[in-house]
Amino acid sequence: PMIRMRNPWGNEAEWNGPWSDSSPEWRYIPEDQKQEIGLTFDRDGEFWMSFQDFLNHFDRVEICNLSPDSLTEEQQNSGKRRWEMSMFEGEWTQGMTAGGCRNFLDTFWHNPQYVITLMDPDEDDDDGKCTVIVALMQKNRRSKRNMGMECLTIGFAIYHLTDEDMQTKPQGLSFFKYRASVGRSPHFINTREVCARFKLPPGHYLIVPSTFDPNEEGEFVIRVFSETQNNMEENDDHVGYGSPTDDKVLPNLPNPMDPKPKDAHNESLLKLFKSIAGPDMEVDWMELKRILDHSMKDDLPKTTSYTPLNYSQQNADYGGPAQGSEGGGLNILALLCGPFCKGTPFESIFSESNEQSPGNANQTKAGGYIGLPPVIVEENNGFSKDVCRSMVAMMDVDQSGKLGFEEFEALLNDIAKWKAVFKLYDPEQTGRIDGFKLRDALNSAGYHLNNRILNALAHRYGSRDGKISFDDFLMCAVKIRTYIDIFKQRDTENKDVATFSMDEWIEKTIYS
């Protein structure tokens, strides 16, 4: 017996043993039989081999099932029915689009959403319904199995949408709170693919693929098969920005239509600007940082940091003031400890810590080490240099690297807006917001972004636990506005299309 095969790598490489294209065995086969089996000797990746050679050289077979939309015209004419297929690729990202299943209502709506529109029922269906098959497959899990990556527990839910519902992109918490699903995957299970078949009336339907638990990261492919056209699309926001629309934010923002108040604060700010800017009355990013850090030091959110004590500094503290220090390390530590020790004598902290940890690496005074835990400090480090550089670039139309006072005032209004938004979503004033709140926070600031951009922001600016700091939130807002402005300058006809040469694109983006 013989087997006809195609190179699994999809290139021109072929088998070169017995019954290969150049093999002498083919001389004994009549020409009419060669023609009957469609034999060719081209370097097309297709070849023949004996069944015994196949058993000797292959130890695993994977069967590829062609999808129902792959029928040829000849096959359709023979009576076989071609199905319609729609496919999208997506991603679950921690703190952003990995919302978990419906059990986790507060985050479920953050999952990717897809809308299908079923126009016509099946031809032979007496109930006037449409056959729909939904298949959700995980990507890149098998290839990383040797790294300990197992399949996630996945599934999906289907919801009916009214014409009014179709105006909302994406559907929010209130929709899922009061709507029941009309279909769902049979199970949430940790297999590569879950699949289910449904009979649904014509209409609009929302499909929400998810992992079982929130914050489980992974990539997926979702496919929808139907006998009639299904018109599948992502149910996501259109990218753009405008004025803030959140009623909770607007009262805290300056009104650009009002006359500029000439109070003492503004006068002192102008005086500070002049003293730092110098004769040219312009500031670069370093000077901008000095002004912002001074003028907004009491308004910026404070972050909590954990500062471990340095052993060499501990030795210096016990043996006397370290070289170059003023008053010694103990005095500094006493000052830091003061707000947190609640009146406990500083010396007792040393003794208690050493008594409680006799066997750890921290030794007693005689050993030269002290048993203090890391010092907890709430601090405001001001604006980072990267944020200041990006803010200058956002307002600096002529790319001079500097801002005048009017540009600086406009920038302050933007910062006031972003600060008010951040405080709204950080009520406990931790200096960080949950990644799941980033979409709402940016919407409150006037930005509209889709899931792909939000995932990119999470990967770029999010912490390991999915949080966004105030500094990184500012960077998100500045970068998005800058890039949208760059694009709209070229998209003069509002067609969502802009053309740049490579030189122009590098020049525009590298300065931002």
Image: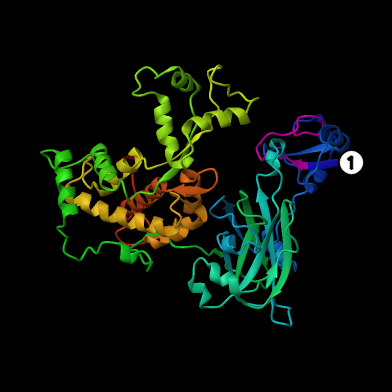
Q: Which of 369 and 45 lies nearest the eye of the viewer?
A: 369
Q: Secondary structure at mark 1?
A: loop
- How many labels sit on residues? 1
Callout 1 crowding tier (Cα within 10 Å): few <14, some 14–19, many ≥20: few
Q: Quadrant of residue 207?
A: bottom right
Q: Residue at x 60, y 64 (%)?
A: 105
Name which residue type carries label 1. Answer: Pro
**Residue 299 lies in the magenta-colored region:** no
**Residue 8 lies in the magenta-colored region:** yes
Q: Answer left or right for 124 relative to 383.
A: right
Residue 34 location, x and y as percent?
A: 79, 43
With respect to residue 432, does 148 lie above or below? Answer: above
Q: Which of 500 and 452 lies nearest the eye of the viewer?
A: 452
What residue does disc 1 label? 1
Q: Quadrant of residue 182?
A: bottom right
Q: Residue at x 21, y 52 (%)?
A: 409
Q: How does the figure colour the protein chain or chains?
A: rainbow
The kind of secondary structure the magenta stretch mainly shows is loop
Q: Residue furthest left?
A: 279
Residue 254 location, x and y as percent?
A: 26, 61
The range drawn in magenta is 5-21
Quadrant containing the N terminus in the rendered view: top right
Q: Residue at x 66, y 55 (%)?
A: 213
Quadrant containing the C terminus in the rendered view: top left
With respect to residue 120, does 15 lie above or below? Answer: above
Q: Is residue 368 visible?
A: yes
Residue 5 location, x and y as percent?
A: 77, 42
